[in-house]
Each structure stands twice: as C-alpha cells, then as structure tokens.
C-alpha cells in the first residue's frame, strides 16, 4: 500500500524529481522516520506503470514477470562463461528460473526492486567480463569498464545491495579470469604484466567507495531506525543473544535456498525465536554451516598444485587423463583455442563441439565465484554493518540465489565426473532433473498463495501467526465478515498482546459496530503500547465527543495535535490523523459557540495538513465559522475552496447556497 497505493510520488501531479529525494515509500529521505530505502529507479518504474494502467495490477505483474525472464536469460548467458555450451549451463539456468525462493520477488510487486537490481547486477558483471577479455588488446575495453560502473550504479538505484557487483567483478577477475590462487596474489603484485589487473581492481574499488559515500550523504548520514518487532534481535539488550541469533540467521537463509518447503510473506517478530543460550540446539546448525563454508572456501582458494579440471574432466599438469582428453597449461589456457573431440555426451555431460574457445575455469575457480555471489550480496542483510528492518526476507535472496544455483551445478558436475559407472552418472543426472521439477512444482504451488491477500496471509499463519492473523483480520473486515475478522484480531493479540496496530484495528472494528465502550478500551491499550499512535487518539476523541464528554475529548484532541512526526515509520499517515484531530477539535469549539477558537484550530490544521489529505470538509467548516461571525467574504472564499478541492462535496454546496441566498 505505502509503496504504490498511497505513494504520492506515483501521481502525475507530483513532480517526478521528488522520486530522487524520497525513499521507496514516498517519505523524505532525510526525515527521521524514513526507512532509508533509496530505490528511485524502481519507484520510477512504478510511476510509469501507474501512468500507463493506473491501479490495474495486471501491468505491474507483467513487468515483474518480464524482468524475471530477462534476468534468467542473462544469468544463463553468464553461466556459459563458466560451464560452456551444454547441459551444465542449461541446468544452472533452469535452477534459477524455477527456484521457489523467487516467488515473493516476482509475484509481489514491491519485489521488483530485487529483480531490477539483479538485472543491472548481471549487466554490470557481463560488461566487466568483456573488459577482462579485451583488456590490453582494444581501446573498447575502457568502454566496457565504464558500462560496468554505470550498470553497478543503476543496480544500486534499484536496490542497495546492487553495489556489491563491483566486489563480485573483482573476484571474477582475480580468481576466474587470471586463475590466481590465494598464495599467488601477493607475488602477483610485483609483476609488471599484472599492472592492468590491479588498475582495474583499483577502479572498481574507487567507484564502489564513491557510490557508497554519495549514498550515505544523500540519506542524511544517518542509519534508519526500526521498531523492535521488525528485528527483535537488534533490540535485545543481551550481547550473547544478538550474536548467536545474527550468526544463526544466515544458516536459516541457506536452508530456505536448499529446501524451500516453508515460505512466508513475513518473517518478523517471533517467526525465528531468538537464540538466548549457547545450549540452544540450533547453534549446532550454525557451527555446521560455518565449518562447511570455511572448508569449502579453504580448499577452493588453496587449490591443487598438480590437478585441475577442464569442464569437469580431471587432468594432471596439463597431461592427458585416463579418458584421453587433453587440457593446456594455465598460460596456454588463456590464449589458445582448445580443440575438443568428446567421446560421448554421457561421459562429458555437454554437447559435441568441433571447436571450443577458452578457457573454461576449473571447479575451484567456479566454487570461489559461486561462494562470493552467494555471500557478498547477502552481507548488507546480515546486520553486520547496520541493523536492518527484517529478520528474514525471501526477496533479499533473489541475487544470492545465483551463487547457490552455480554452486549446486558445479557440485553436480563434480559428482557426475567422479562417478565411474554409467548407472551412477544417470542417477546424478536424474536426481538433478528431479530437483528442478520439484522446485518448479513448489513455485507453482507457492504462486497460488500469492493469488490474493487472504490466501497469502493464511499461508503465513504457521510461520508468523501474529502478523498473519492481524493482516487476515483486515482482509476479512473488508469482506464484511465481521465476526471472523474480530476472531482473527483476537488470535493475533493472543500471540503478541502488545501490537498497537492490532489493538487499534480491533478497536476500530468495535467502534464501527457501535460497541463504543469496548472500542475505547482497545484504543487506550493501543496508546499505551505506542504513545505516538495519532489515529487511536483521534477515534478516542470522536467517541468521547459523541458521548457528550467534551472536556475529555478536547484534552485528547489537543494531546494528539502535539505529537511530533519524528522517527515515525509513516509520517504522512500521522500528519493526516493529526489534521483530523484538529478538525474535530475545531468542530467541538464550533458547536460550543467558540468561533474564534475554532478558526485558530482550523488554521493550524491547514498548516499541518499533508499533501494527500482531502481538505474539503475542513475548508467548509472554515467557511461556516466565518459565516457565524458574519464575515461573509471570508466565508465565501472558503466555500469556494472547498468546492474547488472536491466539486461534489454536498455540505459545501448547501452552505454556499445559504450564503448566496443571504447575499
């Protein structure tokens, strides 16, 4: 809703330049309550969607699906550089295309930020690959690195993690293109032939630093602040709890990539219980995860001095292996075209070619790149440098899933090559095909959950019952299923009793069904849970005013009008509620005959009124106050303003008609 439905930056009357000063939700980026999610290119794409098709969701979904198709094509094309033309590239592409973790990013419109960032991420990486292959032989090489830098900037303007492509490019250059081992990096610094390599790495580093510096400056040099329900671990007072939980969360994310059997639209609050003690059995998962990761990275970086692979075929020091296939030495590998006549597709797992260019990297090289692609884009979500506003977010795994797909593919290829019997080779191949099919089926099933809000929220009850029941209550209420909606709200409060929004929503439901005493009770609980919830003050004051408790109502409205909008997640909605409070306070003074006081309050309301507030009733009441004070020209001015803001506002037609009859 905030990103599209109520985002003023999508409207044609809003100058398009506002997109570059506001966050993803339409809040000024330097505002203390801003989410600091600076994604202007994504917001611009929403604005274009809005200009073409308004609020019809079909066009928004079409763009998301087309972007995912484009990303899949680019990823498959990039995989060819690593695996060559053949089955392995196809497997990597199919794994990415069908992975269920992508459902939220593609089926959820706001997930477009991740897809767009991934699109330019891959474009930047492909440009840098071209730069590497033309470096030292063509002037166009500098055009390619310029393109890589510009695409990296665009990726960051789609979503923050896009800037990490510069680090991935450096990893590709060092470990894949130059095939350096960890022990060779330092000696390589002293070789003149590697000057261009380190010059390119220097350009990547400088450009990345510049992008991050500008990004930090543009958001006011302050990190965002989040509520404790968004990220409970970050709000914990215990250093041990924060440490254990933050170390465990990447393990949970990897499990979602490996086995996406349980997916949810929201993983905040208590969806992942905090790890409060070393004795928590989940710490075993953490230890196993980091041990496996470190071992994999160590053996890949160390490499083997006398053994390499050529597209999955083991060779010793460039000699022929047992199957009679030959590979060239490292230096020959970079410059020669290798003629390969493969005995059979069953043994090699790739299509027959008479001539194969380059340069296919070894398994170790691909593992290093895959691990980098899996880990580095995920680093901004780890709470390592700053706290984030979520526990787990499936859409955040869209870019890292590329590294996962490459890692699975290279692992399957290694198993295929190691297997000696045809039965085992067929088993590996069939198991991989089955994995792709199961991923695809899970994606279809999960996509069904995203068909409408009710199905989506019901699917999330198992993971995050408090949030899911609360959102489901809103849906049921909109369907006029009042008793079911009330039960849903109460279920949400059963799991988390201090949720101010749920307390307020339940109060609103009761108020709309004339259960005013109960509504007041829940509004007071909501205010106790969140003292800055202006809408709760507003409705409390309205009930008190209707019950004739004018003094209590006046105090409630005044207190609401004094609440600042600092550090609030949605300052626009807060300002609307404050304006409504002032409007009702003015009405209260008006009914008591205090017209001067009413006018003062109305003028304050106009000053605090946000852009999206509908002002016709406020303007009409201004005219009424002036009318009662016999200041007819001023009254006529505000009646006209009311009708100008909403031409079919009936109360203004009636009051203006009385004025015209009088004059």
Image (cartoon, rainbow, N blue to C red):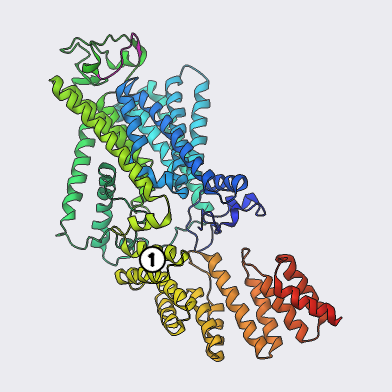
In the picture, the quarter occupied by the C terminus is bottom right
View extreme (right): residue: 663
Residue 493 % position (x, y) = 34, 71
On screen, residue 10 versus residue 394, left or right, reads right
Disc 1, SS: helix
Can residue 183 be seen here? The reply is no
**Is residue 237 positioned above or below 594 on the image?**
above
Task: Please say whether residue 194 is one of the residues in the magenta stretch.
Answer: no
Q: Position of residue 600 (x, y in %)?
A: 68, 82
Residue that carries the numbered disc 1 in the rendered image: 470
Where does residue 487 sit, x and y in percent of width and height? 35, 71
Q: Is residue 205 visible?
A: yes
Q: Residue at x 52, y 45 (%)?
A: 58
Image height check: is 69 above or below 573?
A: above
Segment colored magenta: 349-357
Q: Residue drawn at (31%, 40%), measured in percent from left and top? A: 441
On whether residue 350 falls in the magenta region, the answer is yes
Determine the image quadrant of residue 492. bottom left
Between 224 and 256, the one lying in front of the other is 256
Res. 323 image quadrant:
top left
Q: What percent of the width, then of the height, locates residue 200?
A: 44, 29
């Amino acid at each position: 809703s905030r990103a599209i439905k109520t985002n003023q930056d999508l409207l044609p009357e809003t100058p398009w330049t506002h997109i570059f000063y506001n966050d993803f939700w339409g809040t000024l980026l330097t505002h203390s309550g801003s989410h600091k999610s600076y994604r202007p290119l994504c917001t611009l794409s929403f604005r274009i969607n809005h200009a073409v098709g308004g609020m019809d969701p079909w066009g928004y979904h079409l763009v998301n699906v087309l972007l995912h198709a484009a990303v899949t094509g680019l990823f498959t094309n990039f995989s060819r550089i690593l695996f060559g033309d053949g089955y392995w590239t196809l497997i990597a592409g199919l794994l990415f295309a069908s992975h269920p973790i992508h459902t939220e990013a593609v089926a959820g419109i706001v997930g477009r930020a991740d897809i767009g960032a991934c699109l330019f991420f891959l474009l930047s990486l492909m440009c840098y690959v071209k730069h590497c292959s033309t470096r030292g032989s063509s002037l166009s090489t500098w055009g390619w690195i310029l393109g890589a830098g510009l695409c990296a900037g665009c990726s960051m303007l789609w979503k923050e993690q896009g800037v990490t492509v510069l680090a991935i490019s450096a990893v590709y250059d060092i470990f894949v293109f130059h095939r350096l081992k960890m022990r060779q990096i330092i000696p390589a610094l002293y070789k003149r032939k590697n000057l261009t390599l380190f010059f390119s790495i220097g350009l990547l580093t400088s450009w990345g630093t510049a992008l991050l510096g500008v990004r930090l400056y543009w958001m006011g040099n302050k990190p965002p602040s989040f509520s404790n329900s968004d990220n409970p671990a970050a709000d914990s007072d215990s250093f041990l709890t924060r440490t254990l939980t933050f170390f465990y969360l990447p393990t949970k994310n990897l499990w979602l990539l490996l086995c996406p059997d349980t997916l949810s639209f929201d993983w905040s609050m208590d969806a992942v219980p905090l790890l409060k003690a070393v004795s928590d059995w989940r710490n075993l998962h953490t230890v196993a995860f980091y041990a496996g990761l470190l071992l994999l990275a160590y053996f890949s970086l160390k490499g083997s001095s006398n053994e390499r692979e050529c597209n999955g075929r083991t060779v010793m020091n460039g000699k022929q292996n047992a199957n009679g296939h030959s590979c060239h030495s490292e230096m020959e590998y970079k410059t020669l075209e290798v003629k390969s006549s493969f005995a059979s597709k069953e043994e090699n797992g790739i299509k027959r070619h008479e001539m194969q260019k380059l340069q296919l990297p070894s398994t170790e090289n691909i593992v290093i790149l895959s691990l980098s692609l899996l880990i580095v884009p995920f680093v901004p979500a780890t709470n390592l440098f700053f706290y984030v506003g979520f526990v787990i977010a499936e859409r955040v795994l869209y870019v890292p899933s590329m590294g996962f797909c490459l890692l699975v593919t290279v692992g399957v290829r290694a198993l295929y090559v190691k297997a000696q019997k045809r039965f085992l080779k067929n088993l590996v191949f069939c198991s991989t095909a089955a994995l792709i099919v199961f991923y695809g089926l899970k994606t279809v099933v999960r996509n069904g959950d995203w068909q409408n809000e009710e199905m989506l929220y019901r699917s999330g009850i198992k993971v995050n019952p408090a949030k899911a029941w609360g959102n489901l209550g809103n849906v049921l209420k909109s369907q006029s299923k009042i008793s079911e909606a009330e039960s849903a709200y109460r279920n949400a409060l059963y799991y988390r009793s201090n949720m101010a929004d749920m307390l307020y929503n339940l109060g609103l439901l009761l108020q709309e069904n004339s259960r005013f005493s109960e509504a007041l009770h829940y509004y007071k609980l909501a205010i106790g849970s969140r003292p800055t919830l202006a809408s709760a003050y507003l409705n409390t004051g309205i009930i008190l005013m209707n019950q004739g408790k004018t003094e209590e109502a006046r105090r409630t409205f005044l207190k609401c009008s004094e609440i600042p909008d600092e550090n609030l997640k949605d300052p626009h909605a807060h300002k609307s509620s404050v304006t409504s409070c002032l409007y009702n306070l003015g009405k209260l003074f008006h009914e008591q005959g205090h017209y001067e006081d009413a006018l003062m309050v109305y003028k304050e309301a106009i000053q605090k009124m946000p852009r999206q507030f509908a002002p016709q009733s406020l303007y009409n009441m201004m005219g009424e106050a002036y009318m009662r004070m016999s200041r007819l020209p001023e009254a006529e001015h505000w009646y006209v303003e009311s009708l100008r803001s909403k031409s079919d506002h009936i109360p203004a037609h009636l009051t203006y008609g009385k004025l015209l009859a009088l004059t």
